[in-house]
Image (cartoon, helix red, strand yellow):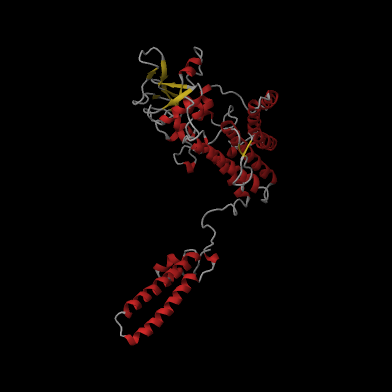
């Protein structure tokens, strides 16, 4: 609440700003002013006592005593709730969400959690680096610790693991807010159910990553979990959270073509069935995996792109081959919708498209048969020209790295991930991929 005045122009300028302050700040200002004046008077009288004659000493002492009493009253005169003020200018869990618009914002925030850099294996593509299809990339000295993942020598104390774990649970928390707090809101029931289904898909999406990366993990399904919560067996997470959430999502979400243009990119029934099929693959229930996969195929919502490179480019964004993708905007400011996933892996040097991590391995390059068009759609080689831009690469990185001094076997070539390429010569466009 703010103080108001009908004729604020008639108030001296130095008080106009005070009149616009919250009441709690105004009273705090007045108390501080009184305290300062009384303290100065008390100090003045103490000094005066030293130079006054003895017959005035008792009078001044009495005055000082009264001033001290008033000063103590000023310091203690406020009630406890004077300082117990609700946060000004920000929402709290007690106040949000309360309306249909709040519900929409809460669901959108659940998607936003997926754009955070640490959400994707801690920022750096360590899962790809640990595979046979990629190496660390960049130049040799940049984030050299990531080589420990390539050689499987990393430890639990790695600085790249905890941020990943934390970001996943942050996404779970946002989904839980929607699932728990939207049901009581008075709003369109069909839209409410869809919002909850979106959140349950997103929660399952995050938990599926958690159990694959960390095994047994705490099962947090409320906004107020017990802080002594222990790890649950990963099979319990599968049974009680992931599968149930995805079954609810596939039943209550629309198909891809049923969304309006403004809602493109939201979770769909097809995305839920696809993720459920993948879950059953990990659980080795191949029949259920096949059943859900066939349902997705027969939905006629998806098809292969004519050009392979379009599937992983701006040209194919939310296209016919896209089952679920994390949307982003071409801004380097994350608050405006940017996403650094592609920037982390973009061409390093000339052109300056990123940091150059997640380098395609020799094994991956050699796995393509002669004439396979997917090779150039997967790997960027030095000397190539893409969208009119020549790829010269990073001067600090060797074009060819050999396994030993004999230079007989190639360990690495300076190559880059074609699937995160965007037109242009700066990093800005990559933030929207």
Q: Is residue 60 above or below residue 373?
A: below
Q: Which residue is outermost to the bottom?
A: 55
Residue 52: image location, x then y, percent: 30, 83
Residue 105 visible within the image: yes
Q: Is residue 73 left or right of residue 266?
A: left
Q: Is residue 12 above or below residue 63?
A: above
Residue 342: image location, x then y, percent: 47, 31
Q: Quadrant of residue 424?
A: top left
Residue 144: image location, x then y, percent: 41, 29
The residue at the point 51 percent across, 56 percent down is: 89
Q: Quadrant of residue 64?
A: bottom left
Q: Is residue 69 left or right of residue 114?
A: left
Q: Is residue 9 left or right of residue 262?
A: left
Residue nearest the observer in this picture, 72 or 199: 72
Q: Is residue 142 above or below residue 400?
A: below
Residue nearest the observer in this picture, 198 or 400: 400
Residue 232: image location, x then y, percent: 63, 37
Residue nearest the observer in this picture, 33 or 349: 33
Residue 417 visible within the image: no
Could you tell me how many numbered marks the image carries?
0
Q: Which residue is outermost to the front?
A: 54
The residue at the point 47 percent across, 24 percent down is: 151
């Amino acid at each position: 609440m703010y103080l108001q005045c009908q004729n604020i122009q008639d108030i001296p300028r130095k008080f106009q700003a005070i009149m616009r302050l919250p009441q709690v700040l105004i009273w705090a200002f007045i108390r501080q002013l009184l305290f300062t004046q009384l303290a100065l008077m008390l100090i003045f009288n103490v000094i005066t006592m030293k130079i006054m004659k003895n017959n005035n000493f008792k009078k001044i002492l009495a005055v000082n005593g009264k001033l001290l009493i008033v000063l103590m009253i000023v310091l203690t005169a406020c009630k406890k709730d004077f300082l117990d003020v609700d946060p000004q200018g920000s929402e709290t869990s007690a106040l949000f969400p309360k309306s249909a618009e709040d519900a929409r914002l809460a669901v959108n925030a659940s998607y936003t959690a997926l754009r955070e850099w640490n959400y994707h294996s801690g920022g750096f593509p360590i899962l790809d680096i640990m595979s046979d299809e990629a190496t660390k990339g960049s130049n040799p000295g940049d984030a050299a610790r990531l080589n420990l993942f390539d050689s499987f020598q990393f430890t639990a104390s790695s600085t790249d693991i905890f941020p990943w774990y934390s970001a996943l649970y942050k996404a779970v928390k946002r989904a839980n807010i929607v699932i728990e707090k939207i049901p009581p809101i008075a709003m369109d029931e069909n839209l409410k159910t869809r919002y909850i289904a979106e959140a349950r898909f997103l929660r399952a999406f995050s938990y599926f990553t958690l159990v694959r990366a960390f095994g047994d993990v705490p099962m947090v399904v409320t906004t107020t979990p017990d802080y002594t919560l222990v790890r649950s067996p990963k099979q319990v997470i599968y049974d009680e959270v992931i599968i149930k959430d995805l079954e609810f999502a596939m039943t209550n979400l629309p198909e891809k073509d049923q969304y309006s243009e403004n809602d493109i990119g939201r979770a769909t029934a097809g995305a839920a069935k696809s993720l459920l099929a993948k879950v059953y693959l990990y659980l080795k229930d191949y029949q259920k995996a096949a059943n859900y996969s066939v349902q997705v195929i027969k939905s006629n919502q998806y098809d292969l792109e004519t050009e392979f490179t379009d599937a992983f480019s701006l040209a194919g964004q939310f296209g016919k081959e896209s089952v679920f993708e994390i949307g982003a905007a071409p801004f380097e400011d994350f608050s405006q919708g940017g996403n650094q996933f592609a920037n982390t892996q973009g061409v390093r040097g000339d052109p300056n498209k990123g940091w150059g991590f997640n380098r395609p391995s020799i094994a991956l390059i050699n796995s393509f048969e002669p004439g396979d068009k997917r090779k150039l759609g997967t790997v960027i080689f030095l000397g190539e020209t893409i969208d009119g831009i020549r790829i010269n690469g990073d001067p600090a990185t060797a074009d060819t790295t050999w396994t030993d001094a004999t230079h007989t076997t190639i360990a690495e070539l300076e190559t880059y991930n074609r699937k995160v390429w965007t037109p242009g010569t700066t990093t800005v466009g990559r933030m929207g991929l």
